[in-house]
Image: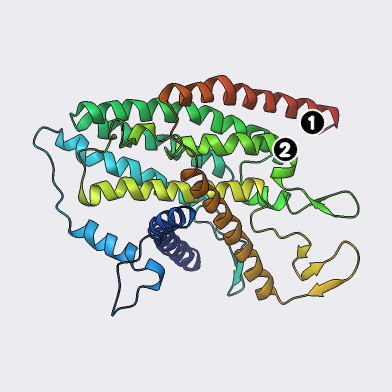
């Protein structure tokens, strides 16, 4: 029995879940603070510890305490089994998706190469889509089990929207899979470390190779996450939402699932289209400039720069998602469905066809 492997896997599971839950908690502050900055307000800043507020960073802690101590009320008219099962089905598949996502380059620990990925499988992207598709059951069961007409309407809208945009979301990445020739996210990042032309000026990032796929992936992913402008399943000013009858930690699971999904989308876009932890001209021994010369760095410095690059790219994507969240108005339900089926889906199919033609033309 390889105890080193077992200890490494357990350590990665604990570390990744702790980091992701911490980031998801922090995103509740980011969402309110960024909206405040955009609207020229102060935002959340009332929670304090010994008089210290630190620009409202203690607010997520206060929210967590409130959520954990709030009454977990179950209305008498709901289906208690489905009502209890729904938030679990919404949260657990999202958490399971993290197993196939690499959180950085591999590290050499005690002479062993340790991957920063819980499950090092060669069909990681397919695994992510499989578990991502299960999240729709949480919304459907929440609406159905609540025995509430408004919640049921929200659940029906959520299921129709998520199933519709899953098709476009998957097809938008087919072109990338054809080019990379793999479903392994680490192999995709490795492919993007290459360059075009002999001068090695332009990196082979997915964004440069498939700009249309990137433009299709973003709205489809936001719609799959049910965030503005695609938040009709939980539109408070219209139909209330599929989790109307939830309170306390059960409602918190739906919220955390949404924020973790946003983080996963940002990570997938960074890994598939932005080169992941790859930094242009940075090799194993430091920077090698295309105009000549180099800047040698120790291995630990290179690894820190790579982890920092991935974190920076994810942060930029989250900033973009929040920018969209607080800029665009909510689409009508017919507009949401028309955008997915009439515009995004044909463009995704066209992108796959063009990719295939170009690959045959260049002999790949």
Residue reaching furthest to the front: 40
Asked if residue 226 lies left or right of residue 121, the reply is: left
Q: Is residue 158 above or below residue 112?
A: above
Q: Which residue is mark 2?
A: 179
The residue at 67%/38% (across/down) is 176
Asked if residue 38 lies left or right of residue 199, the reply is: left
Q: Is residue 238 above or below residue 24?
A: above
What crowding class fits label 1: few (fewer than 14 Cα within 10 Å), some (14-19), or many (20 or more)? few
Residue 257 picture location, percent across and down: 37, 47
Residue 237 picture location, percent across and down: 31, 35
Query: Where on the picture, by quarter, is residue 309?
Result: bottom right
Q: Which residue is mark 1?
A: 359
Check contact, mark 1 vs mark 2: CB within 8 A: yes
Instruction: Estimate the spatial distance between the alpha carbons at disc 1 and disc 2, rounded to whole Å.
Output: 8 Å
Query: Where on the picture, by quarter, is residue 160?
Result: top left
What crowding class fits label 2: few (fewer than 14 Cα within 10 Å), some (14-19), or many (20 or more)? some
């Amino acid at each position: 029995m390889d105890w080193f492997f077992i200890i490494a896997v357990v350590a990665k599971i604990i570390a990744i879940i702790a980091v992701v839950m911490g980031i998801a908690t922090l995103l509740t502050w980011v969402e309110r603070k960024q909206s405040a900055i955009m609207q020229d307000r102060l935002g959340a800043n009332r929670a304090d510890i010994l008089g210290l507020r630190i620009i409202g960073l203690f607010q997520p802690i206060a929210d967590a305490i409130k959520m954990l101590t709030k009454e977990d009320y179950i209305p008498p008219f709901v289906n208690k089994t489905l009502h209890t099962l729904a938030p679990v089905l919404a949260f657990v598949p999202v958490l399971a998706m993290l197993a196939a996502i690499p959180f950085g380059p591999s590290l050499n620990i005690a002479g062993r190469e340790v991957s920063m990925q819980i499950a090092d499988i060669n069909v990681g992207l397919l695994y992510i889509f499989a578990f991502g598709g299960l999240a729709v059951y949480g919304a459907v069961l929440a609406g159905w089990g609540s025995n509430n007409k408004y919640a049921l309407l929200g659940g029906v809208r959520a299921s129709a929207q998520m199933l519709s945009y899953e098709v476009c979301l998957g097809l938008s990445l087919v072109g990338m899979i054809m080019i990379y020739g793999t479903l392994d996210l680490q192999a995709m990042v490795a492919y993007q470390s290459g360059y075009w032309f002999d001068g090695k000026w332009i990196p082979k990032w997915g964004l440069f190779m498939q700009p249309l796929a990137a433009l299709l992936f973003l709205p489809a992913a936001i719609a799959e996450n049910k965030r503005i402008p695609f938040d009709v399943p939980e539109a408070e000013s219209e139909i209330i939402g599929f989790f109307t009858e939830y309170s306390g930690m059960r409602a918190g699971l739906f919220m955390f699932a949404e924020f973790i999904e946003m983080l996963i989308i940002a990570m997938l876009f960074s890994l598939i289209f932005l080169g992941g932890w790859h930094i242009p001209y940075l090799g194993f021994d430091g920077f090698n400039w295309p105009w000549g010369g180099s800047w040698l760095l120790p291995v630990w410095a290179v690894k820190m720069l790579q982890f920092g690059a991935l974190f920076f790219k994810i942060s930029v994507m989250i900033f973009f998602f929040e920018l969209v969240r607080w800029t665009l108005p909510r689409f009508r339900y017919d507009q949401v469905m028309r955008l997915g089926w009439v515009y995004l889906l044909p463009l995704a199919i066209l992108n796959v066809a063009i990719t295939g033609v170009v690959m045959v033309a260049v002999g790949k």
